[in-house]
Amino acid sequence: MNVTQNNTLLEKINIAGFILKPNSKDIKNIYLEIKKIFESFNIKVLLDTDGARQIGIKNGIEFDELCKKSDFLVTLGGDGTLISVARRSFKYQKAVMGINLGTLGFLTDIMPDELNIFLENFKNNHYRIDNRMMITVQVNGKEVVAFNDIVISRQTISGMINVDAKVNGRLFNKYNGDGVVISTPTGSTAYNLSCHGPVVYPLTEAFIVTPISAHSLTQRPLVLPVDFQISFENKNQEVANVIIDGQDIYELKHKDIITIKVAESKAKLIHRIERNYFDVLNQKLHWGAK
């Protein structure tokens, strides 16, 4: 398992492409204030079309064009906004900076009230870029990229799923229950954690396969190397759901197979150089609390 922290910083930091959290109240004034801060550091700010429409201003730029014109991307919202942008911008390999509008996130660790200090460090190359493993899934003839996880779950409240799981073409398990989560290390603290899967350091490279309410006490979470290719076949007559990062849903019909492998490239996240993952775990999960 490799640990990948990128020591290579951005070549240019002149243009920032902003994406706002959808349907967020009072975000306009926050965005305009943050825009001023970026401009005070001689960083031009571009805003995507959806965000511009949301706050009622003109001159928004379509997302693909925004990626092409920007030196890096900035999300204004929470972890969900960052995950969506990391997936949508994946083919452009743009580094993403997450500014958090709520409490400290697992991914978005820059708070608005510390932005001046961070940008001063940013301009002086005092920051880091983390490379986060992504996974791809072949589903319904389409290749889709996931940042956190891929979940196979039942469509209805009653019944259960029944899927055969193979590694490099060889059967290794049969999952019977409410579903199964295939997670990246970054996603290990998401749905995987609520299903009693392991927490894996996010810069590790591994698959985490965790059953959801398995109908057998022998079923346990499994960590697999990334050089494996994993496939899952729906053995039920009923249709199952394939859910990508909790955002996109596809149907998995009887005898349909999805194939999962590590993506060739990684997501790039801009962080404070002082950020410590274990401090985040302590705060978010209350580890070490008395």
Image (cartoon, helix red, strand yellow):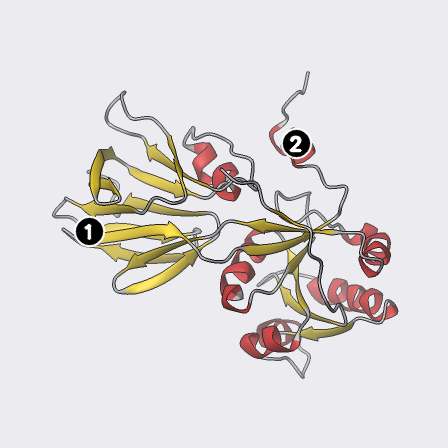
Q: Is residue 35 above or below residue 121?
A: below
Q: Which mark is residue 239?
A: 1
Q: Secondary structure at mark 2?
A: helix
User: Residue 248: which quarter of the image?
Assistant: bottom left
Residue at the far left: name it: 237
Q: Is residue 85 above or below residue 58?
A: above
Whether residue 146 is visible here, answered yes or no, is yes
The residue located at (29%, 39%) in the rendering is 179
Dividing the image into 4 quarters, which one contains the C terminus? top right
Q: Position of residue 250 (x, y in %)?
A: 30, 58
Q: Amino acid at mark 1?
A: Val
Q: Secondary structure at mark 1?
A: loop
Q: Position of residue 129 (x, y in %)?
A: 67, 52
Report whether 181 appears left or right of 21: left
Q: CA distance from mark 2 to mark 1?
A: 40 Å
Q: Amino acid at mark 2?
A: Phe
The residue located at (56%, 65%) in the rendering is 93
Q: Position of residue 159 (x, y in %)?
A: 19, 38
Q: Earlier in the sequence, mark 2 or mark 1?
A: 1
Q: Which mark is residue 278?
A: 2
Residue at the far top: name it: 290
Packing grade of label 1 (10 A; few <14, some 14-19, many >=20) is some
The residue located at (77%, 72%) in the rendering is 14
Q: Nearer the viewer, residue 6 or 217?
A: 6
The residue located at (44%, 51%) in the rendering is 245
Q: Is residue 146 above or below residue 191?
A: below
Whether residue 161 is visible here, answered yes or no, is no
